[in-house]
Amino acid sequence: MPIVTPYSNARRFSSTAGAGTGTGATFAIAATAFTADTGAAATAFPALYSYYNLYINGILQTADTSSVTTTAITIPGGDVLDAGNPIIVEFIIS
């Protein structure tokens, strides 16, 4: 039986914590506040993906740190981050 290599690709989006709104559990950053890998402004996050990784200031975060929809990423307590901290969201698409 031949080995079939699975298709896997990534979509990365970057912004800063200062682009977020809300406080405490409702702190969120809109997808439109991110820049895609292409350098263009993002319009939405992918609707279908296998999983995503969140990096805050270059450090990979645990799964309980955020939740994501096509329109925003919610980072409870993210309002205490320095406004200049980079936020990177990486979606793995299979």
Image (cartoon, rainbow, N blue to C red):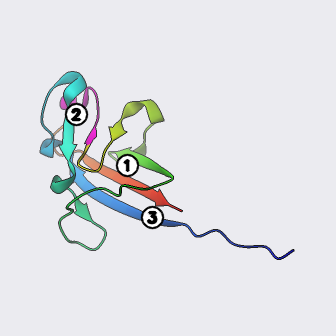
Q: In this view, does 36 lie above or below 54?
A: below
Label 3, secondary structure: give it.
strand
Q: In this view, does 33 lie above or below 83?
A: below
Does the segment drawn in magenta span residue 9? no
- Residue denoted by label 2: 81
Q: What stretch is highlighted in magenta?
A: 73-80
- Residue denoted by label 3: 10
> How far apart are the two marked residues, 2 and 3, measured between alpha carbons?
26 Å
Q: In this view, does 27 lie above or below 48?
A: above
Amino acid under disc 2: Leu
Q: Neighbour class for label 3 at 10 Å: few (<14), some, many (≥20)?
A: some
Q: Which of marks 2 and 1 is nearer the N terminus?
A: 1
How far from the left and from the top, in percent, is residue 23? 15, 26
Does the segment drawn in magenta span residue 78? yes
In the picture provided, is 2 more to the left or to the right than 32? Answer: right
Q: Neighbour class for label 2 at 10 Å: few (<14), some, many (≥20)?
A: some
How far from the left and from the top, in percent, is residue 79? 18, 30
User: Which quarter of the rendering shows the N terminus?
Assistant: bottom right
Quarter location, residue 45: bottom left
In the picture provided, is 60 more to the left or to the right than 20? Answer: right
- Residue denoted by label 1: 58
How far from the left and from the top, in percent, is residue 25? 24, 24
